[in-house]
Image (cartoon, grey):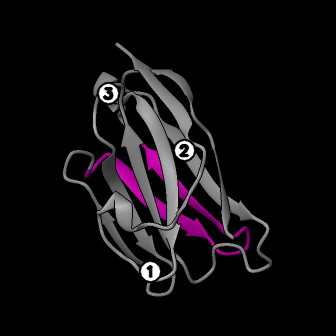
Amino acid sequence: QVQLVESGGGLVQAGDSLRLSCTTSGRASGIYGMVLGWFRQAPGKEREFVACFNWSGGITDVADSVKGRFSISRDTAKNTVYLQMDSLKPEDTAVYYCAADWTYYGRAAHEFDFWGQGTQVTVSS
């Protein structure tokens, strides 16, 4: 079982930046070799794809709604994947989830097997 742990959420003003982190506990090799995704869910809305990272190939995919403002990266030494969020907008307010899968690389939330507990990001205007 892979347990994901997110951190880095908070309350910021429009235009500010935040960096979310995702790592894992309970697995010696961490999230190495997995596909990592970031999703978000605002109140009353469906869970939405944000970004995806293939650890093995270093391939990334970012949703059009955040492209140019958000980026996904990794720290191999720390076995951690980051979601860097710049120029935040009030519409970015949501609970952000880290997800992982052994093989699936894509935008469909239901395809990811492992999920973190979520971290709240609130952007005030």
Residue 31, image quadrant: bottom right
Judging from the image, what secondary structure is the residue with disc 2 in? strand
Q: Are marks 2 and 1 in contact (CB under 8 Å)?
A: no
Q: Earlier in the sequence, mark 3 or mark 1?
A: 1
Label 1 sits on residue: 58
Q: Nearer the viewer, residue 12 or 35?
A: 35
Q: Is residue 5 above or below residue 90?
A: below
Q: Which quadrant is the C terminus positioned in?
A: top left
- What's the residue type where badge 2 is placed? Arg
Q: Earlier in the sequence, mark 2 or mark 1?
A: 2
Q: Which quadrant is the N terminus positioned in?
A: bottom right
Q: Position of residue 120 (x, y in %)?
A: 53, 31
Horizontal relation, residue 19 to residue 44: left or right? right
The furthest residue to the left: 64
Q: Confirm whether the magenta stretch covers residue 122.
A: no
Q: Position of residue 114 (x, y in %)?
A: 55, 63
- What's the residue type where badge 1 is placed? Gly
Q: Position of residue 118 (x, y in %)?
A: 56, 41
Judging from the image, what secondary structure is the residue with disc 3 in? loop
Label 2 sits on residue: 19
Which secondary structure class fits the magenta region best?
A: strand
Task: Look at the image and give the residue range highlighted in magenta.
Answer: 67-86
Residue located 32% across and 22% down the image:
90
Label 3 sits on residue: 89
Q: Earlier in the sequence, mark 3 or mark 2?
A: 2
